[in-house]
Amino acid sequence: MITEQVFKERMVGTINTCIRMINESDKWDIVGRGIIENEWQSFIIEKNNTFVAILTILSNKQAIHFKQHEWSGFEVNTHANGKLNDLLKKYSS
């Protein structure tokens, strides 16, 4: 049986893939670093099962909230997730 922990690990992997794709897109910040730092934090808000990723984008911390249907399922991937797809479009296009 698939547990919440497995879905959380898949979401972490999906976010890591998105970060890698953005940072390898040949776009850099003004001092030559990747756009999104590789180290980031996450937690789940228990009352509504929201996955929160705290990313550092261009040296600014940003929290991205994913509702349960956006992270807890079999179809989790970078391009299918609207919020991650928006990040890709904004920072790697």
Image (cartoon, rainbow, N blue to C red):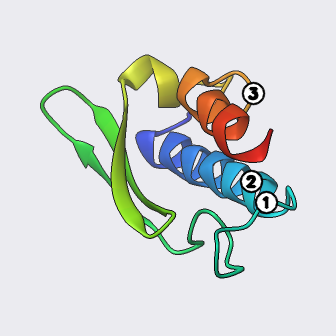
Residue under circle 3? 79
Earlier along the polypeptide chain: callout 1 or callout 2? 2
Residue 34 placement: quadrant:
bottom right
Which numbered mark, 3 or 2, is in the foreground of this view?
2
Image coords of residue 14 (percent x, y): 66, 46
Residue under circle 1? 27
Work out how far the residue at label 1 is from the one at label 2, CA to CA, in angstroms: 8 Å
Which numbered mark, 3 or 1, is in the foreground of this view?
1
Left or right, residue 2 beside residue 24: left
Residue drawn where x is 68% and y is 46% of the image? 91
Find numbered disc 1 in the image and state the secondary structure of the residue it sits on: loop
Residue drawn where x is 38% and y is 63% of the image? 60
Q: Nearest the camera: 13 or 73?
A: 13
Find numbered disc 3 in the image and state the secondary structure of the residue it sits on: loop
Work out how far the residue at label 3 is from the one at label 1, CA to CA, in angstroms: 19 Å
- Crowding near the residue tagged with mark 3, few <14, some 14–19, many ≥20 C-alpha atoms within 10 Å: few
- Marks 3 and 2 close (CB-CB < 8 Å): no
Residue drawn where x is 85% and y is 55% of the image? 25
Q: Nearest the camera: 74 or 30?
A: 30
Q: Is residue 47 above or below residue 43?
A: above
- Crowding near the residue tagged with mark 2, few <14, some 14–19, many ≥20 C-alpha atoms within 10 Å: many
Amino acid marked by disc 3: His
Image coords of residue 50 (percent x, y): 29, 33
Earlier along the polypeptide chain: callout 3 or callout 2? 2
Q: In the drawing, what numbered circle is on residue 22?
A: 2
- Marks 3 and 1 close (CB-CB < 8 Å): no
Left or right, residue 4 beside residue 76: left
Amino acid marked by disc 2: Ile
Earlier along the polypeptide chain: callout 3 or callout 1? 1
Work out how far the residue at label 3 is from the one at label 2, CA to CA, in angstroms: 13 Å
Left or right, residue 38 beside residue 75: left
